[in-house]
Image (spheres, grey):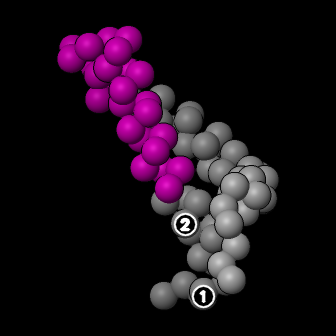
């Protein structure tokens, strides 16, 4: 088991991985359709996109938290 202090990083890694996998699959399908080589192209696109998505999630999380706290009413 990993220490709890790594939870935000692990969350970001898993979330960015799933989202970039789906996004890469959709855009690859839209470009190529179901043809030979689709899966390989999809995985190559995902391999490029996941590090970018993970970096953005890590970098933008503080800003998004501030925006969310600005948009929601605090419990009283």
Tell whether position 24 is magenta.
yes
Image coords of residue 34 (percent x, y): 21, 17
User: Is the C-beta separation of discs 2 and 1 under 8 Å?
Assistant: no
Q: Residue at x 56, y 34 (%)?
A: 48
**Going from the N terminus, do you reach mark 2 or mark 1 first?**
1
Q: Residues within 10 Å of mark 2 (few under 14, many from 20)?
A: few
Task: Give the numbered dot on residue 34.
Answer: none
- Callout 2: helix, strand or loop? helix
The main secondary structure of the magenta stretch is: helix
Where is 32 relative to 26, above or below? above
Image coords of residue 19 (percent x, y): 46, 45
Residue 66 lies in quadrant: bottom right
Residue extending farthest to the front is 76
> In front: mark 2 or mark 1?
2
Q: Quadrant of the C terminus?
A: bottom right
Residue 63 visible from this viewpoint? yes
**Image side of residue 70 versus residue 75, left or right:** right
- Residue under label 2: 11
- Residue under label 1: 3
Residue 61 visible from this viewpoint? no
Cα distance between the residues tagged 2 and 1: 13 Å
Q: Residues within 10 Å of mark 1 (few under 14, many from 20)?
A: few
Q: What is the span of residues highlighted in magenta in the rendered image? A: 15-41
Q: Residue at x 38, y 21 (%)?
A: 28
Image coords of residue 54 (percent x, y): 62, 50
């Amino acid at each position: 088991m990993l220490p709890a202090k790594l939870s935000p990083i692990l969350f970001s890694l898993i979330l960015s991985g799933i989202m970039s996998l789906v996004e890469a699959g959709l855009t690859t399908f839209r470009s190529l359709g179901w043809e030979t080589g689709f899966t390989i192209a999809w995985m190559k696109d995902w391999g490029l996109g996941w590090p970018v998505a993970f970096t953005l999630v890590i970098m933008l999380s503080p800003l998004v938290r501030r925006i969310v706290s600005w948009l929601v009413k605090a419990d009283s």
